[in-house]
Amino acid sequence: MSVTRSYESILAEERRSALRGVGLVAAVLAACLASLAITGFFDAERFAESGPAILQLASEMMPPDFSRWQSWVKPLFDTLAMSIAGTALAVVFSLPLAILAAPNTSPHSVVLFVVRTLLAFLRSVPEIILGVLFVAAVGFGALPGVLALALHSVGMVGKFYAEAIEHVDPKPLEAARAAGATPMQVILHAVMPQVLPQLTDVTVYRWEYHFRASAVLGIVGAGGIGFELMAALRLLAYDQVSAILLSILVCVVIVDSIGAYLRKSLK
């Protein structure tokens, strides 16, 4: 009798769990549909009216004009340099902040709260806004782009690093502390060996993202290929715009391939 009741209770719990899952999926779907409706995605008339303009723009972008390709080489290398420099700075500042933002390595709960709040603030400000601010502060060129990428990415990379540190196996940490290791020794010998592969993955992914973001930052005067893209847009030279976009696409594919190779090699 007790076995039957236990079986029935298990089935009842399974049904309740399934219903909760269905309810959650339905809620997410409803939120997605509502958001699409609010943003005008279901406005068929608007899409129909924009059709001729889209076709006209597409016709002006074809064929791509690569006549100025030589003047795009340096901006593309500047964009690559911005992505590498921004990633390097982000890693340098993110790692110590991540250690302070992880509950198992933070020295105090107040420090934990302050650092987590700082990381949340940094990732809440888009790179494009930071780019505008740094262009106003230090002038045009690649420097404001590097600073904008690094500052925003400290918030994102620091969060990912902190989560990786938070979920390490606690047994090596306990053993190191029991042996009398200092907090720094615990981090170096018990934490870092466990999280290094994850930190490497996050860093490489962020570099890939930085290359794409660097191209956008050039639009606000932060140098790189985005500056050339904005110049072509202002001149309504859409055939050059398409050529620049194709050049960026090729570079993104190359960067992504390098990133995949690095992730595979560093594991």
Image: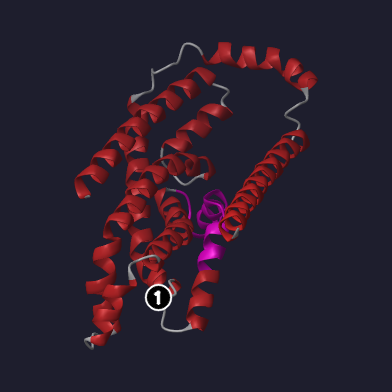
When the figure is inspected, residue 38 is found, relative to residue 145, above or below; the finding is above
When the figure is inspected, residue 233 is found, relative to residue 1, above or below; the finding is above
| Residue at 24% from the left image edge and 65% from the top image edge | 193
Name the one closer to the observer, 211 or 194. 194
Name the one closer to the observer, 172 or 214. 172
| Residue at 45% from the left image edge and 15% from the top image edge | 64
When the figure is inspected, residue 229 is found, relative to residue 94, above or below; the finding is above
Displayed quadrant of residue 23: top right
The residue range painted magenta reads: 118-140
Assess whether residue 98 is covered by the magenta stretch. no
Assess whether residue 121 is covered by the magenta stretch. yes
Amino acid residing under circle 1: Asn
In the figure, is residue 240 to the left or right of 35?
A: left
Task: Give x and y (percent) for residue 174.
Answer: 30, 80
Disc 1 element: loop
From the image, tell me which residue sits under label 1: 104
| Residue at 45% from the left image edge and 26% from the top image edge | 245
User: Dot 1 surroundings within 10 Å: few (below 14), some, or many (20 or more)?
Assistant: some
